[in-house]
Amino acid sequence: MAKRAALQRLSPEDHTPLFPTRFGSDVLREFDDGSRWAKGLWVAALLIGILDALRWHSGAGFAYDSQPAWQSAHAILHGGASWNRFVYLPGCLLIVFPLALLPFKVTEALVYAVQILGLGYAFWAMTRVIKVPLGSVRIAWAALLFVLCGQLGIAAHYENFSILLLPLAAAFFLSIDNDRPMAAAVILGISLTVKPLLAPLLLLLLLGRRWRETAVAILIPVALSALTLLIVVGVSADPSKLWNEVIGTFSSDTAKPWNMSLTAMAGYLHAPTTVGVVAVVIVLAASLIAYWRMWTNPRGDAGEQAVWLTAPLFVIVILCSSFSWGYYCLLLVPLGFVSLRHDRVADWAVRLGVFLALAPPLLVYSLPGYPDRYYNEATDHIFRLGILLNGASVIGVLIALGGCLLYAFADELPSKLQADFRSTRLERHSTPDRVSPAIRGELVREGNPKFTGTSPI
């Protein structure tokens, strides 16, 4: 009893573990403490998620993106080499080698299960970062809207490794929030090995003068890739074809109809190339200004600030690179989470932008026939529905960037635009002994009478 009482009196400085070590006593209790609305929304989100998971699994082209990794690893283990459509770092093969020992049907089922569990972990970890319980109505709404987003569905259907970056990004931000930079560096190194889309997070370590952690995050993918190449050479395979496949794929994909970069959108709309270039320069400048402003004027907890700080860099990755898949917008999911903590104008702009960036493929639900009704893969011709699909995502990303700028320059805005429209935090309705240590600590810092032992006047 004494030990349990001590656990309930954890101070604000106590850290949340990277994984829910007491799932039954912490996580399930947060759901149990939620209102009827929250429970109903969570039930709806889970039911829709299960139906979507079954539908995505049964569609044509399932596991299209995970198959090349399995084929390459399988070929190497059998003394050959197959780099067809393998566009990852070589070190990614070390993760896939154990799966290559299994039949591909088993592998695709395991990868699918890992993706689903990873999304669940991402939700748990990000709620630790923003100090809002899973039983909150707004978290339940976020879960329901998230499972309806088509960008998630398309990435899950193809088993694209971009989904695996969501739990890794959430673990990174949770490590930063807990002041565990080395854990964050290891997680970042693993993510770069899987897919280097989270590379902008390196700037957090660099600008924080975390030289050792930065070196670790870089050396992990480099060392794993070097080891993989040694294995490839050891089986007398030709590693040069790997580089040719990566370069050839991305150089050819810039003209594909699923490219949603600004330069590609200019081409779809038959605008001059200069229009796309100017748009890239404007977005690049706005993103860097927002980044620098937030870096020089930090606000909020470490994890929350890290998410706001890196969001403009992910906007650059999505819109300003020569090629960008629509599901690259999943990189903005952590930003959507931190916008749930308050109700400022900046937060509402981010929510609208992130949802719009992820949701346009809802057209796939109401207008069946993806991808044939959106573009012609044989001729690389995009139709009006495809332009609408990509354009809506681009607009959403731009709105999210606008929210970042509002947050970055909040001190210069009129007081009405700085105000939090929510008078009380939703998690304040939770009882003191049934919330996680991280959330309890946040409420103690805010002086919530339920958690400080004082009574309101």
Image (spheres, rainbow, N blue to C red):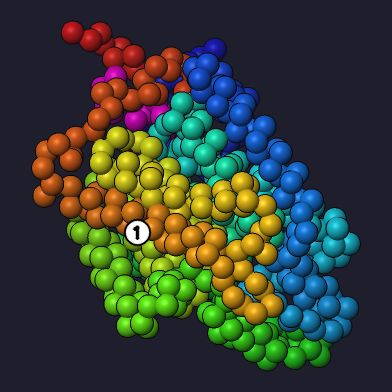
Say whether residue 207 is left or right of residue 131: left
Residue at 78%, 59% in the rendered image? 60
| Residue 224 visible in the shown view | no
406 or 136, nearer to the observer: 406
Residue 126 place in picture, x, y as percent: 47, 42
Q: Could you tell me how many numbered marks the image carries?
A: 1
Reply above or below: 346 against 11.
below
Residue at 86%, 58% in the rendered image? 105
User: Which residue is labeled 1 in the image?
Assistant: 398
Residue at 43%, 14% in the rendered image? 431
Q: Is residue 439 magenta?
A: yes
Residue 270 place in picture, x, y as percent: 42, 77
Reply above or below: 419 against 256.
above
Q: Is residue 412 magenta?
A: no
**Helix, strand or loop: magenta stretch:** helix
Q: Quadrant of residue 204?
A: bottom left
Say whether residue 88 is left or right of residue 94: left
Residue 255 place in picture, x, y as percent: 54, 80
Question: What's the magenta region?
Answer: 437-448
| Residue 435 visible in the shown view | yes
> Crowdedness of circle 1 by 10 Å Cα count: few (<14), some, many (20+)?
many
Q: Quadrant of the N terminus?
A: top right
Reply above or below: 250 against 125.
below
